[in-house]
Image (cartoon, grey):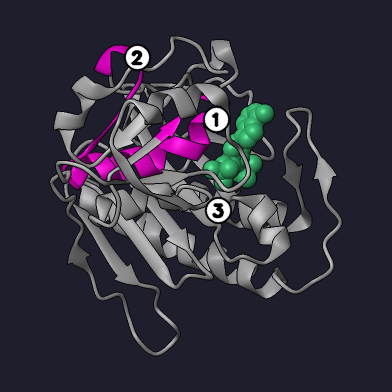
Amino acid sequence: MMRFDGQNPDEIALKLAHIAVEAGRILRGMETAFLEKRIKDDGTPTTAADLAAEQLILKRLEEAWPGVPVVAEETCSAGHVDHSFFLVDPLDGTGDFIRGTGEYSVNIALIQGQRPTAAVVAAPAMGSIWIAGATARTSPLPDGTADFDWREATVRPAPEKDLVALVSRRHGDSATEVCLSALSIGTRRMTSSALKFCLIASGEADVYVRCGPTMEWDTAAGDHILTRAGGSVVGPGGIPLTYGHEDRGYRNGPFAAIGDNALASRLDLPRVAS
Ligand SMILES: Nc1ncnc2c1ncn2[C@@H]1O[C@H](COP(=O)(O)O)[C@@H](OP(=O)(O)O)[C@H]1O
Ligand SMILES: [Mg+2]
């Protein structure tokens, strides 16, 4: 198997960015197509666009890093994972893609030893991309003429009161509300997909709590970007999330994404997802 030893995480992240941009072009091209959706066992939708983007990503990952296992939402979510593997969500926020809000993303993360080490989240319809290797960076998406224009992504210190919380547009639950009520939230912004992690990484919001079900490919890339921007993604007890849990079907437990790590002591997450 191709090893990553000696490969710079920032260079890996940049390669992932190129793959996500290409996948994003496929998705943009399918935005207005009539797409039949299929409801999966977990109740979430999938379309031909999810599959087309995933096939492209799997091909490009295999070309760049032959033999490295990939756990991807649509086609191989039950594979066996090694020390190093990729987590791929080709279209995070499928519901929003179908409804045309533009709030969807392509998420790819390299996991090594249960934690992400390089990642990309691209938001094709919003025209933005975030990556992280050792450092977190963001850029407008290249449009054919312009190349990437990277600048560092950095979290902001949490204000004393009136925190900005990001909440899922489509998936809320009462445990999340209880946890949010213990914080001084001034503004709630509904946002879909892994964009929530990225907006905190860019200092535009403070917290995202999720006690309802999510999968590892929904969070790994955003987790790494936010962590490298100075924030963190923690489960109960303030412990960072880990990845590669084949035994629990790659499901996450409850978590909170925070820009200012001082907020961790004010969180009281339940032990299991609601
Ligand atoms: N019942 C469920 N089981 C597992 N994951 C779920 C779920 N309901 C929602 N999700 C996850 O929540 C994601 C959407 O999050 P949000 O509401 O923040 O946009 C979905 O991503 P996909 O759109 O990639 O399937 C899906 O993985
Ligand atoms: Mg998803």
Is residue 233 one of those drawn in magenta? yes
Residue type at tag 2: Pro
Residue 266 position within the rendered picture, expressed as x and y whole percent measured from the top left: 23, 23
Residue at figure coordinates x 41%, y 64% from the top left: 18
- Residue at which label 2 appears: 236
- Residue at which label 1 appears: 215
- Residue at which label 3 appears: 57
Tell me the quarter of the image containing the N terminus: top left
In the displayed structure, 107 sits above or below 251; it is below
| Label 3 to label 1: alpha-carbon separation | 18 Å
Left or right: 219 as drawn, with respect to 89: left
Q: Which residues are magenta?
A: 209-238
Report which quarter residue 75 is drawn in. top right
Which element is circle 3 on? helix
| Label 1 to label 2: alpha-carbon separation | 17 Å
Residue 213 position within the rendered picture, expressed as x and y whole percent measured from the top left: 58, 26
Q: Nearer the viewer, residue 32 or 267?
A: 267
Q: Is residue 19 visible?
A: no
Instruction: Say whether mark 1 is within 8 Å of ligand 1.
Output: yes
- The answer to which of marks 2 and 3 sits earlier in the sequence is 3
In the rendered image, the residue lying farthest to the bottom is 145
